Image (cartoon, helix red, strand yellow):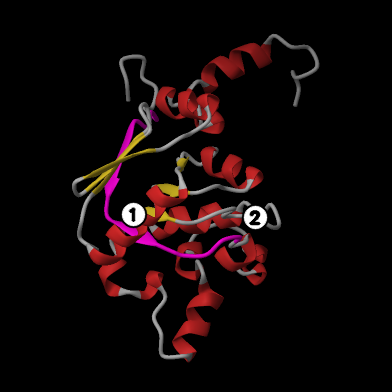
Amino acid sequence: MNAAGLTDRRITRIEGRAVAVRGDDIDTDRIIPARYLRCVTFEGLGEHAFEDDRRALAGKSQVHPFDDPRHQAASILVVNRNFGCGSSREHAPQSLLRRGIRAMVGESFAEIFFGNCIALGLPCLTAGREAVEELILFAQGHPEGRVSVDIATGKITFGDHRVEGRIPPGSREALLAGSWDATGFLLDRYQEVETVAARLPYVRGF
């Protein structure tokens, strides 16, 4: 809570371990299979992130990064181009958030997926292909290494490296100001909402 009694939702910096999922055009059906869209709440959705990809690799005696014990504590996801394309399911970023992901860095993100992420307070920064490749190699080679994502400056720091990340100004300001959570902001000031509603003749009586 801040001095005004409102919840502080400002997001200025994300720090943690990184996990990399390689591949261009990874769509939302791969992030969270369609059979999980029938869920009533998002609780428990994190355990099903990339479920079909994980099963397919396990069948080949290979390990998906999300099943690799070295990356279980990762909070920063590194991806390639056009991540989150396909159907505009809100469940995709929800599953990643509930898996423990708190920020993403990639070459590019599908527009609707990006918007859904920002609405959850999940920053998505873009960087050049070479910079992303450096970060992927760092995540794979140093699973316990720390990565820092500075929302204000766009700087992404890992090991001895620092690369430039980008995020649209409007999204950056929403994260820094804490205004990304419109529902939470409304609930924090719900007494004001009720006061205004009480003055409206078409609301009284409902």
Image spot of residue 47 (x, y percent): 45, 68
Identify which amino acid the numbered label 2 is placed on.
Answer: Cys
Quadrant that contains the N terminus? top left
Give, as a single range, the part of the protein colored magenta. Answer: 9-25
Alpha carbon distance from label 2 to label 1: 23 Å
Which residue corresponds to the image point at 55% horizontal and 47% vertical from the top-left? Answer: 108
> Regarding mark 2 in the picture, which secondary structure is present there?
loop
Image spot of residue 167 (x, y percent): 48, 33
- Residue found at the far front of this picture: 130
Q: Quadrant of residue 31?
A: bottom right
12 or 155: nearer the viewer: 155
Quadrant that contains the C terminus? top right
99 or 204: nearer the viewer: 99
List the residue tagged with mark 2.
Answer: 85
Q: Nearer the viewer, mark 2 or mark 1?
A: 1
202 or 81: nearer the viewer: 81
Which residue corresponds to the image point at 57% horizontal and 57% vertical from the top-left? Answer: 92
The local crowd at label 2, few if under 14, some if 14 to 19, many if 20 or more residues have their Cα within 10 Å, is many
> Regarding mark 1 in the picture, which secondary structure is present there?
helix
Above or below, 148 relative to 198: below
Q: Is residue 112 left or right of residue 64?
A: right
Q: Is residue 63 left or right of residue 28?
A: left
- Residue found at the far top of this picture: 199
Image spot of residue 53 (x, y percent): 53, 76
Residue 10 lies within the magenta run: yes
